[in-house]
Image: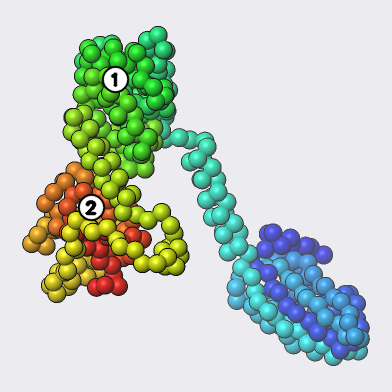
Amino acid sequence: MAKIAQVSAKYIIHAEISIDGVVDRPDVIGAIFGQTEGLLGSDLELRELQRSGRIGRIEVNIETKGGKSFGTIIIPSSLDKAETSIVAASLEIIQRIGPCNAKIKVKNIEDVRVSKRQFVVDRAKELLKNLIEAVMPDSQELADEVAYAVRVMEIREYGKERLPAGPAVDESDEIIVVEGRADVLNLLKHGFKNVIAMNGTNVPETIIELSKKKTMTAFVDGDRGGDLIIKELGSVAELDFVTKAPDGKEVEELTKKEIHKALRSRIAFEQAKTELQVAEKNKRSVDKRTPTRDYKDRRAAPPQRAAQPTGKPKQPTTREKEVFGAMLEDLIGTRGAYILDHKLNILGKVPLSELQGTIKSLKSGIYAVVFDGVIDKDILMTAERAYVTFLVAMDSKVKSSGRLAILTSDNL
């Protein structure tokens, strides 16, 4: 008798069988062939179909429980859909197997090609992913990799302190001073060759000597450490310009666009020095106004006279509240900020990540700032220094201690 493997079939018939008695597997197969014989005509005779290989081997799995038999029947088929369906339906006319009553129910006809097609699609996705990630980098990736390798090879040691530097420090009229070797590598990667690192917070003698001959720009991280380096470098060297990475970022992780933007917005050292002094003065005044005990202690302690603020926060008019509320609703989910003038005109819209830098650069003329976020101490201090009247946000972690008014969605 010919056989057809399930892997070469187009369809597989799945049926369940229940028998009121105990029978064996050969009994079930015999009943299938015997009771369907002559039912469907010579073209769909199961024995002939199996002999010609159009019906595969009939698989029967039987188990007995409580004096009754239960199991499954699996029949692979290479017939077309209609013929396979007819063969499947013919199984359900079987009502007895041996001396026992029986019932066969076809559960489904599986299209083997669908599952094979899905396997092909899933496997193709996996192979393509591996090809993209590990096997075939595109031409741009190859070019970037070669360019990066060449620029890393360009790093050299400069001066008696053997400072990491680019190859163009000697020949350039301007140099960029950064904090460490990783910063030099990142700037070299993006084409800046006139860069040298301090390699620490102490200013090397080589940097001091270079500052006397060349125009020097300090490019530091956007954190408190960057401010300290500016102060240290400015106190011993002839520093000309200062620029910083965006708040919370380091020079070594900046993109090419961020580097260009930072260098274009560099400011004179004297201006940076003044801004640092003002920031420290404001910080000291805020620290003096801030009690050292926590909130619970302040509630439990007897009332004390608070220091008088420099001015009272302005109360928003009805129209201002309406405008602020509408703008705040418009910003929901955008992580953006509107900057407004005294006539409530929008001076600009910026991402929340650039808000503090934008306020610092404008310095004045800002009447209100509306943004999708939470007001914290840093944003509050930046807004106070720029003489902002209203700071509007979804929520606030701090309370205003001066003339600046804080408004949240609850207030509006």
Is 245 placed above or below 395 here?
above
Q: Is residue 96 visible in the rendered structure shown here? A: no
The reply to whether the C-beta atoms of the residues labelled 1 and 2 are less than 8 Å apart is no
Give the residue number, with chain letter if any, for mark 1: 236
Residue 221: x %, y % from top left: 35, 35
**In the rendered structure, which disc, 1 or 2, sits on the residue that comes first in sequence?**
1
Nearer to us in this view, 20 or 254? 254
Please report the residue visible at 28 percent of the width from the left and 67 percent of the height from the top: 408
Nearer to us in this view, 124 or 262? 262
Q: Secondary structure at mark 2?
A: helix
Q: Is residue 203 visible in the rendered structure shown here? A: yes
Which quadrant is the C terminus positioned in? bottom left
Residue 372: x %, y % from top left: 29, 61
Is 253 placed above or below 198 here?
below
Residue 395: x %, y % from top left: 33, 65
Give the residue number, with chain letter if any, for mark 2: 383
Please report the residue visible at 71 percent of the width from the left and 68 percent of the height from the top: 76
| Residue 59 located left or right of residue 316 | right
Is 267 placed above or below 369 here?
above
Which quadrant is the N terminus positioned in? bottom right
Q: Secondary structure at mark 1?
A: helix
Please report the residue visible at 44 percent of the width from the left and 59 percent of the height from the top: 294
Location of residue 367 (image quadrant): bottom left
For badge 2, the amino acid type reads Ala
Q: Residue furthest left?
A: 343
